[in-house]
Image: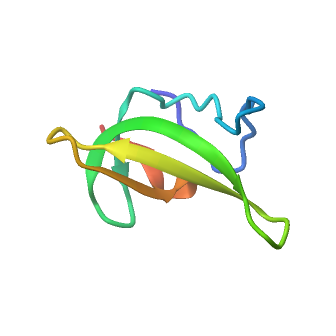
């Protein structure tokens, strides 16, 4: 499986959704140690002008959570 680097740039639609290569893949959130399917990576514009990449993950039991996109790794 291809390694995904945090600094790589992936295309982002006008809606702020990133075309991340791990979409639909089982991933691990390194911050919480949770595992699930990566359902979206969005770019959020904060008040100070920063853009933050937020990953959305859904576990097998349907619970969803968010984490920084940098925390997402494919499950091996």
Q: Is residue 23 left or right of residue 54?
A: left
Residue 17, position in %: x, y? 64, 35
Residue 71, position in %: x, y? 48, 57
Q: Is residue 7 left or right of residue 37?
A: right
The quadrant of the rendering that contains the N terminus is: top left
Q: Is residue 5 visible?
A: no
Q: Is residue 61 left or right of residue 7?
A: left
Front residue (pair 73, 37): 37
Report the coloring of the rendering. rainbow
Residue 75, position in %: x, y? 31, 40
Front residue (pair 52, 20): 52
Q: Is residue 43 above or below residue 39?
A: below
Q: Quadrant of residue 8?
A: top right
Q: Is residue 16 left or right of residue 30?
A: right
The residue at the far left in this view is 61
Q: Is residue 16 above or below residue 44?
A: above
Residue 52, position in %: x, y? 68, 59
Q: Is residue 47 above or below residue 1?
A: below
Q: Residue at 37% of width from left, 45% of height from top?
A: 57
Q: Is residue 3 visible?
A: yes
The quadrant of the rendering that contains the C terminus is: top left
Q: Is residue 48 above or below residue 44?
A: below
The residue at the far bottom in this view is 48
Q: Residue at 55% of width from left, 28% of height from top?
A: 21
Q: Residue at 39% of width from left, 66% of height from top?
A: 31
Q: Quadrant of residue 4?
A: top right
- How many numbered marks, from 0 up? 0
Q: Quadrant of residue 58?
A: top left
Q: Residue at 75% of width from left, 39% of height from top?
A: 9
């Amino acid at each position: 499986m291809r390694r995904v680097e945090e600094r790589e740039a992936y295309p982002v639609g006008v809606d702020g959704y990133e075309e991340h290569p791990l979409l639909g893949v089982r991933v691990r959130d390194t911050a919480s140690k949770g595992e699930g399917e990566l359902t979206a990576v969005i770019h959020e514009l904060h008040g100070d002008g920063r853009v933050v990449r937020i990953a959305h993950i859904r576990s097998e039991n349907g619970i969803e959570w968010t984490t920084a996109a940098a925390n997402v790794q494919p499950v091996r």
